[in-house]
Amino acid sequence: MFNQVRNMKNCQPYKELIMKEVDGEITPSEKEALFLHLKECADCRKELEEFQKLKEVTGTMKKQLFPEMAWEEYWNHLYNRIERGISWILISIGSVILLVYGIYHGIMELLGDPQLPTLIKGAILLLIIGGVLLLVSVIREKLMVRKYDKYKEVKQ
């Protein structure tokens, strides 16, 4: 038991080198020191092999789980596009309703506050109206430009 604990302490500096080796970030001098240690330490050799197998398996998983062709086929189906579009429309409508509700109640409280000077109330009201008009203008511009965007079909 005592030898095992002592060996673990001796192996501790090599654990980081094992990870560097697996990630391909090890320097030549570190690699030499690691492989000298691996000649004598079966536990560290086994750990290095396990990490290398794990990296190999996880590296190939992405390609096997959902290849690019499958994504293209997924988006070619009308139902999938409609489902995503309707979801975004519902989220947008819900957000607009909550935003309008919040702005309405904010304005009502602002106008109902007798201690706030009329000039400040007017300035805040103008700021809100200006912000809303600017937002609508930007949205309209983006929608118009989107119709005529010659690069919209280009995949990035």
Image (cartoon, rainbow, N blue to C red):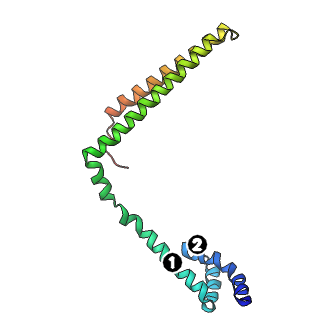
SS at badge 1? helix
Identify the amino acid type marked 2: Glu
For image coordinates 36% across by 31% down, the residue present is 145
Quadrant of the image occupied by residue 70: bottom left
* Residue at the spot 53% in from the left edge and 76% down from the top edge: 51
Residue 87 visible in image: yes
User: Residue 47 appears at what percent x and percent y?
Assistant: 57, 81
Callout in the foreground (1, 2) = 1
Could one spot residue 127 in this view of the protein? no
Q: Amino acid at mark 1?
A: Gln
Relative depth, front residue between 114 and 127: 114
Q: From the viewer's perspective, is residue 152 above or below residue 129?
A: below
Q: Nearer the viewer, residue 83 or 74?
A: 83
How many circles with numbers are drawn on the protein?
A: 2
**Image-based side of 13 in relation to 38, left or right:** right
Q: Label 1: which residue? A: 52
Q: State whether residue 58 is above or below residue 43.
A: above
Looking at the rendered image, the quarter that the N terminus falls into is bottom right
Residue that badge 2 annotates: 25
Q: In the shown orientation, is residue 66 left or right of residue 97? A: left
Q: Residues within 10 Å of mark 2 (few under 14, many from 20)?
A: few
Q: Which image quarter: residue 64?
A: bottom left
Query: What residue is shown at x 35% (from left), y 34% (from top)?
Result: 146
- Label 1 vs label 2: CA separation? 14 Å
